[in-house]
Image (spheres, grey):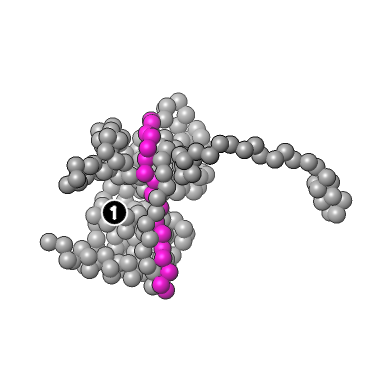
Amino acid sequence: MDDLSNNYNQVSYSKPPEIPWKKELCNSVNLIGIVATPVEIKHLPSGKAVAWTRLAVKKSATQTSWISLTFWDELAHVASQHVEKDCQIYVSGRLVSDSVDSDDGKQQTYYKVVVQQLNFVEKNLSPVTLYGQDPDYMSAGRKLGNNAANSTDSVEEVWQAFFANPVDWWDNRKNKRNPKYTDLKHKDTGEALWVEGRYNPPWVKSQLAILDTRMGSLP
């Protein structure tokens, strides 16, 4: 092993070249994925328009990341009129974050991408072609809903999506006839969450209490 290490140490690797500093490169995100929820749009009193959806980004044949997308102004209207659930899109934009306090006083951070460029992906290379035989990919939201508690990371991503847009979810906590029935269920994707879920992050209950207080104070 020592001889092998010495051989590696003797190999000379080129230093990566320098590039000019550009503001747009300081925070740049590029993604291709499947639109998991219908695009929703809202017109603000300021005259601005904002739209949002979620993107299922396939990391492998068995792993999917869920990314919240936000569109502003003209791009919000474009997305609202042309982007549909289950279509494959390319987005480029900036990564932004919001923070909330957890039970232990630490801050939990949520991330989303503010889209600056939007394109549709040609259909000649489908997700099945790219990632192997995975026919459930096009219905990725429903797939995760049926296996909602398969890991801590996936459940945390779904909870983040819930707190980002709670109005997109059915709240069954007060009218459950069966304790095993889902507490929260996404209206479009079928993703499911349980307040007493095994893989829930520790900050879920405190944030639910805060959210319930805020929602209860709305007219």
Is residue 75 positioned above or below 97 on the image?
above
* Residue matched to label 1: 165
Identify the residue shown where x is 46% and y is 44%.
Answer: 27
Name, please, the residue furthest toward the front: 21
Is residue 194 positioned above or below 168 on the image?
below
Q: Where does the N terminus fall, quadrant-wise?
A: bottom right
SS at badge 1 = loop
Start and end of the magenta stretch? 104-120
Q: Where does the C terminus fall, quadrant-wise?
A: bottom left
Residue 187: x %, y % from top left:
26, 51
Identify the residue shown where x is 41% and y is 63%.
Answer: 108
Is residue 66 positioned above or below 101 on the image?
above
Identify the residue shown where x is 23% and y is 42%.
Answer: 48
216 left or right of 124? left
Indicate the amino acid at tag 1. Answer: Asn
Name, please, the residue furthest toward the bottom: 104
48 left or right of 16? left
Residue 70: x %, y % from top left:
33, 44
